[in-house]
Amino acid sequence: MPRVWLIGMMGSGKSVVGRRLADRLAIDFFDTDSVVEHLAGRSIESLWAAEGEEAFRRLESMCVERLIDVNAVVSTGGGVVLRPENVDVMRSSGPVIWLRASARTLVDRLGNGRRRPLLGGADLDVKVRELVAQRAEAYEGAATVILDTDEMSTEEVVDAIEALL
């Protein structure tokens, strides 16, 4: 079985769905944000504050490269699709599934968004809408499958992905 790549905005359910899907498929699960923290030796918030977004994106790309040989479900960071080389790697090694959710749903799921460097200090509703608008084309271009998850439970999303595989 190839890698299964889950893409989407923060709050789209990639990690929750990814863990459940990996359990069902009896394969490993990786969250690129966790792998980046391991590689950096510190939290994403700390990395972002000290070295900025570019340093984070470099480590994120390194993480994607390292995971192409692993039989796993991979939950990616929300901005992984911003680098074409990441998209190329993901599409060449397995299905890329966009867990698409509306801005309203994302805001509801994110709560206050404090632990998200891109959202810190911003009006959450406004910032999420901006990010959705900025990234929608990149997600669509990267995805081999799009699942609209606004009205779906975690189990329904996992069922839908499993049926596709």
Image: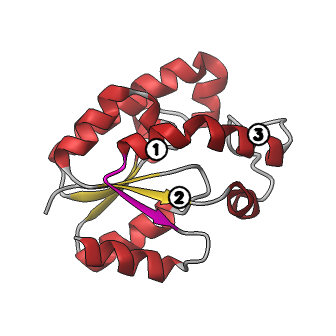
Residue drawn at (67%, 24%) of the image: 49
Amino acid at pointer 1: Tyr
| Residue 37 appears in the figure | no
Residue 86, by quadrant, is top left
Q: Where is residue 25 drawn, in percent x and y?
A: 24, 75
Circles 1, 3 touching at the beta carbon (< 8 Å): no
Q: CA distance from mark 1 to mark 2?
A: 9 Å
Residue under circle 3? 127
Find disc 2 in the rendering and name its residue: 100
Q: Note whether 142 is above or below 156 in the view shown.
A: above
Highlighted magenta segment, given as a residue range? 143-148
Q: What residue appears at the point 49 percent right and 20 percent down from the top-left corner?
A: 55
Whole-percent x and y of residue 104?
Answer: 74, 60
Q: CA distance from mark 1 to mark 3?
A: 17 Å
Circle 1/circle 2 CB separation < 8 Å: yes
The residue closer to the viewer here, 101 or 76, is 101
Main SS of residues in magenta: strand
Distance from the alpha carbon under mark 2 to that under mark 3: 17 Å
Residue 126: image quadrant is: top right
Q: Mark 2 packing: few (<14 Cα in 10 Å), some, or many (20+)?
A: many
Q: Amino acid at mark 2?
A: Arg
Q: To which residue does mark 1 refer? A: 139
